Image (cartoon, rainbow, N blue to C red):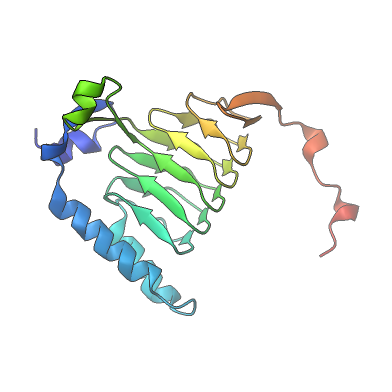
Amino acid sequence: MNVIDIMKRPAAYASGYENIPGEEQNRAKQLCWEYNRTAPKEQQKRREILQELLGTCHPMTGIEPDFHCDYGFNIHTHGLTVINYNCVILDTSPVNIGAGAFIAPGVCLACSGHAVDLGQRSQGIGTSAPITLEENVWIGANTTVCGGVTIGAGSVIGAGSVVTHDIPAGVIAAGVPCRVIRPITEKDKIRPEDILF
């Protein structure tokens, strides 16, 4: 099994820096550079770059520049995906983004990490684990989601959170570290008469 095959598996792994597929990383950097230099009116060009960059790119995927990722081939969008300004996805493992995802400005989805042991860390040993956002997840601004995390369908992550463990479906969670605050209920609906347009 080669390095790319290992990276594409939905399983955690550890690796040395010398095994990083540099050519694939340079390809992603180039495509992100091109994407981030498109004009707002160049929507077709943006769609074409995303189709080339991402492993799976649903036609209803929209990403505002600046956007950065490690490889691109490990990012998969599965429906309407709205990614706002200054998002970083460190996709050393698969990142699956379910339909109806809203990702606010400044979010970081970080599959990758470093060895905790200082000797191993100084030798360039790193870790990686997949991230899954199930359907209809909203990630608040400046949130970090760490490797190995699944966020359940319909959940909302409050701004500025650091998500280190799985979050169940249908809840509001926030904080550092992120924890469940309460379930989402009918009381959270905006009343029709309060919708101005």
Q: Nearer the viewer, residue 118 or 108?
A: 118
Say which residue appears at 54% left-offset and 41% top-offset.
Answer: 143
Quadrant of the image containing the C terminus: bottom right
> Would residue 24 be visible to someone looking at this image?
yes
Q: Nearer the viewer, residue 60 or 65?
A: 65
Say which residue appears at 36% left-offset and 68% top-offset.
Answer: 35
Q: Position of residue 28 (x, y in %)?
A: 26, 57
> Would residue 57 be visible to someone looking at this image?
no
Say which residue appears at 33% left-offset and 62% top-offset.
Answer: 32
Quadrant of the image containing the N terminus: top left
Q: Position of residue 185 (x, y in %)?
A: 76, 31
In the displayed structure image, the side of residue 87 where residue 182 appears, left or right: right
Residue 122 vertical position relative to residue 94 in the rendered view, above or below: above
Q: Position of residue 4 (x, y in %)?
A: 16, 41
Residue 154 vertical position relative to residue 55 in the rendered view, above or below: above
Res 46 quadrant in image: bottom left
In the displayed structure image, the side of residue 54 where residue 97 appears, left or right: right
Say which residue appears at 49% left-offset and 76% top-offset.
Answer: 40
Q: Nearer the viewer, residue 33 or 125?
A: 125
